[in-house]
Image (cartoon, coloured by chain):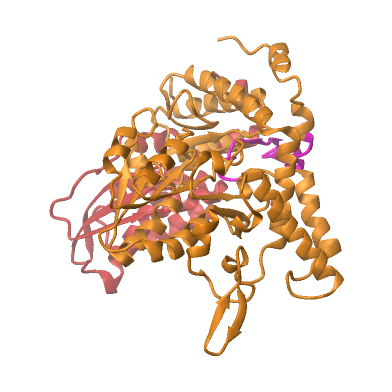
Chain colours: A red, B orange
Amino acid sequence: MAMSDYGGEGLELSSLQDLYQQVILDHYRRPRNKGPLEDATHTLTLNNPLCGDVIDLMLKLEGDRITEVHFEGKGCSISQASASMMSGLLKGRTVQDALDVMDTFTRMLHGDTDAAADTGLGDLRALAGVSKFPVRVKCALLAWDCLQELVRPETSDS
Amino acid sequence: METPDSTSVTSSHAAYDIERIRADFPILARLVHGVPLVYLDNAASSQKPYSVIQAVDAYYREIHANVHRGAHELSIRATEAYEGARDVVADHMGAASSSEIIFVRGTTEAINLVASTWGAAHVGSGDEILLTKMEHHSNLVPWQILAERVGATVRYVDVATDGSLVMEDYDRLLTSRTRLVGVTHVSNTLGVVNPVAEIATKAHDVGAVCLVDGAQATPHMQIDVGTLGCDFYAFSGHKMLAPTGIGALWGRRELLDSMPPWQGGGEMISEVRLDGFTAAPLPHKFEAGTPHVAGAIGLAEAIRYLRRIGLDAIHAWESALTTYAMERLGEIDRLEIYGPKQNRVGVISFCYADIHAHDLATILDQKGVAIRAGHHCNQPLMEHLGVDATARASIYLYNTHSEIDVLVEALGLAAHLFGVT
């Protein structure tokens, strides 16, 4: 069925199409690096008590380099796709690189068009449409909140 | 299936003027994202008719002052209005006396009041509190807090796959150790109506008292606490057309009399000395501080509004609409509805294919359709059902068949976006 068959205003339908791009649904349905990481050095579970989304992030750090990223979780397509995309992008990066990616990603989610144009975000750029849905930003950031907690110097030996 | 014959719908609800009812609710005329609002989140909170908004407005414009305090005209008028509102609630609930109605912020506060006062006085180490697996967090956590404090145990009656309580499990768990049975009248997730009268009778047989969470029942059905036979009945105003921040606890007079006061302060005392105080008589003993006078007045007006239309007529309209919604949703492949087919109100929880409830809610919102997504403050029940979250559409007196059609169309859009066939 063509989108126009649903009638209504074009604006919000195109926003919805931006929000639910194929690449996002692909990460939601075929998440990368989902499952246990037996030699993880850092793990943390965060949930969103309002909606029940859960991400359990597992990192293997060697020095200041992230050599493995796995996750477990349940929740909406945005929270799960974001975790899946993150896991592929951050493998092999330094902690500082990862935090820089998070900074750019966060700015993109808040509508910064320069950030959205940064090819360093890889598949994460597909989540730019979240900026039109402010209540969903916390879904996209859940896995990243785990990352930030895990690599903070004072909590680095969790 | 066939769309309902509008003539037959009209004829079976000849006295139910849906257009006139909708016109009473100003918010229903507004647009959301450029399309008409389809408000199906009534189990979370209902919208308000003009008469309630005007009653609150008139109170503040014309008679506001503190109650039970001054000997001046406004204070006297405000006190009359506040106590008059209590009379309306008492009459509506079938209470033996207005002094059995305690005004509170809502169901949550009512249950916390009972747990903190009756519970602290009557529940001790080794005692049991019997709840069900379908209770809202507000009828779970206050009892868990009490049990932890006094060394009591909380037990939970099982829920069957159709959403009904397993009464054999209730019979098994109800013992001479049980001090209190707490049960929801209507499930906020499954819509099932529980056999409260039978539960209360059995509780009394073992010497336990029975508290009923009526938050999801009072908006939709006539309650008579005498017929139900329970000991405490808690409900919220905002789910039944009244303002937020007001609700009531009904309790049997002899129980309320025997309970220690809850919060201390003004209003709840008859005398204060440096070496102690004497609590005020019921109901003010449990109403420390300046109460939500405007809320109580709004609640009384909401009750008058519901009674003008008639709770029986509302129930008949909602039943027909619920049946229609269940049929239309039931036609959708890979859409699963939770809860019973019969003996339910129009609280319809469902999951659709692999589309997460939050994604459904976002997509439906863009079509003006307001639903709830998540665990509905019902995490143990969700775990029992084996789901993380459900979408929940909940019906009230102003919803229409065509709004259900909009819901179904919007689900079609969700299916399209997610490639669900």
Quarter that holds the N terminus of chain B = top right
Start-end of magenta stretch: B23-45
Question: Quadrant of residue B297 in the image?
Answer: bottom right
Residue A44 coordinates in the image, percent (x, y): 27, 58
Q: Is residue A80 visible?
A: no
Is residue A54 magenta-colored?
no
Q: Is residue A22 above or below residue A33?
A: above
Which residue is at the front of the view, B68 or B238?
A: B68
Decide whether residue B33 is among the magenta residues: yes
- The percent coordinates of residue A23 (x first, y second) are 40, 36
- What residue do we see at 51% from left, 40% from top? B228
Outermost residue to the left: A39
Q: How many marks?
A: 0
Q: Residue at x 66, y 66 (%)?
A: B291
Residue at coordinates 62% horizontally, 44% vertically from top-left? B94
Looking at the picture, tell me which residue is in the foreground, B399 or B139: B139
